[in-house]
Image (cartoon, rainbow, N blue to C red):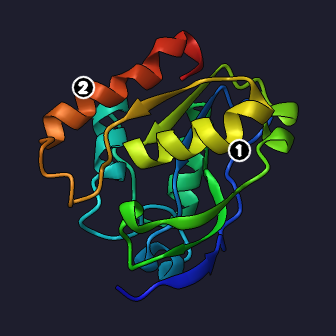
Amino acid sequence: MEYTRVIHPLAPIFDRNSRVLLLGSMPSPKSRELGFYYAHPQNRFWRVLSGVFQEEIRADTASRTAFLLRHGIALWDVLHDCEIAGAGDQSIRIPQANDLLPILQQTEIRSVFTTGSKAGQLYERLCFPQTGIHARVLPSTSPANCRYSLEALISAYRALLEDGETC
């Protein structure tokens, strides 16, 4: 297995009205190449959010960013850097966490969610001691997670709506 040292290249998406923090582990090679979150066309992340909020999301970065902010969602990743083989979260080693405190201090974040179990494990180990907020783990939207249909993912991600009118 060939490992690559990756430093997170994407800025977090949030504004002062963000109420929910949604964290992945580390952007995939395709997302890093295209410069935006969940950019691989087979990843179901954007289709899932579209289904949860019953709203079409155009594929451009500006539209996706506006969608997130309109619904009070802050988006980033748990890791600042790590060694990883391809896009496989299970291969992550030597992880270093992003500093989430600036986001938490500038927003009204009420809930933290992770997009997958590895992101959840990394968050609890590396970030929870700093934030004091436990994360709720949602299923990965990766095409590798074939256990979940699109409908099942949408159902699971409706947890984002539990924060009521802010989302």
Identify the residue under disc 2: 155
Q: Residues within 10 Å of mark 2 (few under 14, many from 20)?
A: few
Horizontal and vertical percent for residue 126? 67, 44
**Res 123 seen here:** yes
Identify the residue under disc 1: 14
| Residue type (three-letter) at the residue carrying disc 1 | Phe
Horizontal and vertical percent for residue 147? 12, 44
Is residue 70 found left or right of 55 in the rendered image?
right
Rendered residue at 46%/13% (across/down): 162
Q: Dot 1: what SS?
A: loop
Point out the image quarter for the N terminus.
Answer: bottom left
Q: CA distance from mark 1 to mark 2?
A: 24 Å
Rendered residue at 34%/70% (across/down): 40
| Nearer-the-camera pick, 139 or 127 | 127
Is residue 9 found left or right of 16 in the rendered image?
left
Rendered residue at 43%/48% (across/down): 118
Is residue 144 found left or right of 164 in the rendered image?
left
